[in-house]
Image (spheres, helix red, strand yellow):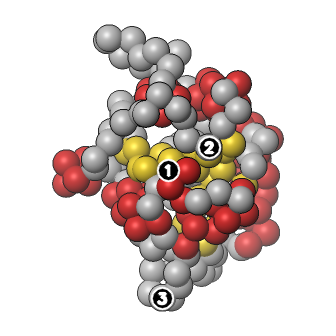
Amino acid sequence: MSSGRPPAAVLFDRDGTLVEDVPYNGDPRRVVPVAGARSALALLRRRGVRTGVVTNQSGVARGLITAAQMRRVNERVERLLGPFDVWAVCPHGPDDGCRCRKPAPGLILAAARELGLSPGECAVVGDIGSDMEAAEAAGALGVLVPTALTRPEEVRRAAHRAPHLLAAVRILTGAAVPAVEGGPR
């Protein structure tokens, strides 16, 4: 997967990838980083790789959370794991027909543009098939980090997979990956 050179930027899905998935979370106190998130982000930053978040937040369109609640949750993620170089958020619902909601490529295209990069210079790390579909549609490299919520067919379709977040980042950066990966370090 790696050509020996890391991508210029790694864009992460938020829920289930960077932080534990709490459906329609409007409470910053419920934000908990996934195992290995801090180490993964530190590795990228040490290597000069820019970081970003690309996240669907349909709870806003559905009326389950307010835009202000979503911003407070994002601010908490930023405090715990940031700084991130870019945030791209889709507040639309699945039937809104927007171009930003994953699996559409809009969030990735917008994040790359804001960073002054082509999508091909970016990698996307996510936990479900729509993250990988969005990466492919944008022309970015996608790496799936499956969770208990990832459907088996999404895992089978993913061109690139990693057992956890830190392993995904190690692969993308060419950092040594232990022969037996027992979990995040």
In the image, residue 89 lies at what x, y percent? 64, 66
Q: Which residue is mark 3?
A: 97
SS assignment at label 1: strand
Q: Residue at x 52, y 32 (%)?
A: 5
Q: Is residue 57 above or below residue 35?
A: below
Residue 164 circle label: none
Q: Badge 3, how many Cα within 10 Å: few under 14, some, many 20+?
A: few
Mark linked to residue 8: 2
For the residue labelled by badge 2, is the local secondary structure a helix, a strand or a loop?
Answer: loop
Q: Amino acid at mark 3?
A: Gly
Q: Give above or below for 33 relative to 157.
A: above
Point 36% across, 16% down: residue = 181
Which residue lies under the disc numbered 1?
124
Instruction: Point out the frontmost of discs 3 and 1.
Output: 1
Front residue of this view, candidates 1 and 56: 1
Q: CA distance from mark 2 to mark 1?
A: 11 Å
Whether the residues at callouts 2 and 1 have beta carbons within 8 Å, the answer is: no
Could you tell me which residue is drawn at 40 percent across and 44 percent down? Answer: 143
Q: Position of residue 174 (x, y in %)?
A: 48, 24
Residue 173 visible in this rendered orientation of the protein: yes
Locate residue 42, reporting x and y percent: 68, 26
Residue 102 visible in rendering = no
Q: Is residue 2 left or right of residue 116?
A: left
Looking at the rendering, which quadrant does residue 154 occupy?
A: bottom left
Toward the top, the furthest residue is 179
Q: Amino acid at mark 2?
A: Ala
| Rendering quarter of residue 137 | bottom left
- SS at mark 3 in the image: loop
The amino acid type, in three-letter code, at marker 1 is Val
- Tell me which numbered mark, 3 or 1, is placed earlier along the sequence: 3
Disc nearer the start of the sequence (2/1): 2
